[in-house]
């Protein structure tokens, strides 16, 4: 039997956060863009009722909280965002969190670096 999956996304939410391996990054902060996709079975008999979908404002609020504290690695922020969504949306079939860091400070000519995690509910 086929399943229709609905995907709710947050794309390129911009944050200025004290995340970085080097101490000066944690002091000065960096610019980050966070994208999230959450897919779940579509059983939406009433397409105008927010209770039958996922409120992307909640995805933003989770992300904003996680991006505030100092930390060294983007992986820890991505893992925390993913875990909070997984716990809040137990029927999710797939969750993907991607965090992009603008102008990483290692001297190369590079637009951004990126870390992503994907959860698949088997």
Image: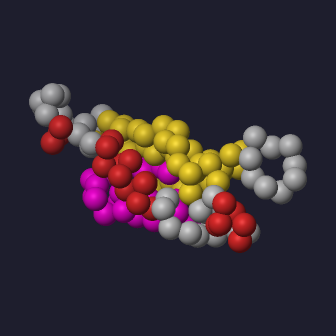
- Residue at 28%, 59% (x, y): give it: 88
**Rendering coords of residue 91 (x, y %):** 27, 53
Quadrant containing the C terminus is bottom left
- Please say whether residue 88 is one of the residues in the magenta stretch: yes
**Position above or below: 108 against 17:** above
In this rendering, the count of numbered labels is 0
- Residue at 58%, 70% (x, y): give it: 71
**Position above or below: 14 against 118:** above
- Residue at 31%, 63% (x, y): give it: 87
Which one is nearer the viewer's eye here, 120 or 32? 32
Colour scheme of the rendered structure: secondary structure
Judge left or right: residue 92 versus residue 25. Answer: left
The stretch in magenta equals: 74-97
Which one is nearer the viewer's eye here, 76 or 27? 27
**Position above or below: 100 against 121:** above
**Position above or below: 107 against 68:** above
Residue 62 in view, yes or no: yes
Residue 74 in view, yes or no: no
Which one is nearer the viewer's eye here, 76 or 60? 60
**Rendering coords of residue 37 (x, y %):** 43, 43
Which one is nearer the viewer's eye here, 92 or 26? 26
Displayed quadrant of residue 121:
bottom left
Quadrant containing the N terminus is top left
**Rendering coords of residue 75 (x, y %):** 59, 63
Displayed quadrant of residue 86:
bottom left
Q: Is the magenta stretch mostly helix, strand or loop?
A: helix
**Rendering coords of residue 97 (x, y %):** 50, 51
Displayed quadrant of residue 8:
top left
- Residue at 43%, 40% (x, y): give it: 10
């Amino acid at each position: 039997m086929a399943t229709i999956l609905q995907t709710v996304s947050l794309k390129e939410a911009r944050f200025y956060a004290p995340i970085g391996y080097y101490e000066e990054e944690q002091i000065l902060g960096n610019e980050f863009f966070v994208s999230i996709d959450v897919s779940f079975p579509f059983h939406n008999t009433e397409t105008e009722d927010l209770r039958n979908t996922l409120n992307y404002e909640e995805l933003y609020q989770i992300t904003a909280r996680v991006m505030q504290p100092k930390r060294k690695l983007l992986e820890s922020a991505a893992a925390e965002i993913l875990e909070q969504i997984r716990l809040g949306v137990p029927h999710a079939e797939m969750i993907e969190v991607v965090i992009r860091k603008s102008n990483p400070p290692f001297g190369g000519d590079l637009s951004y670096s990126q870390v992503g995690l994907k959860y698949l509910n088997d």
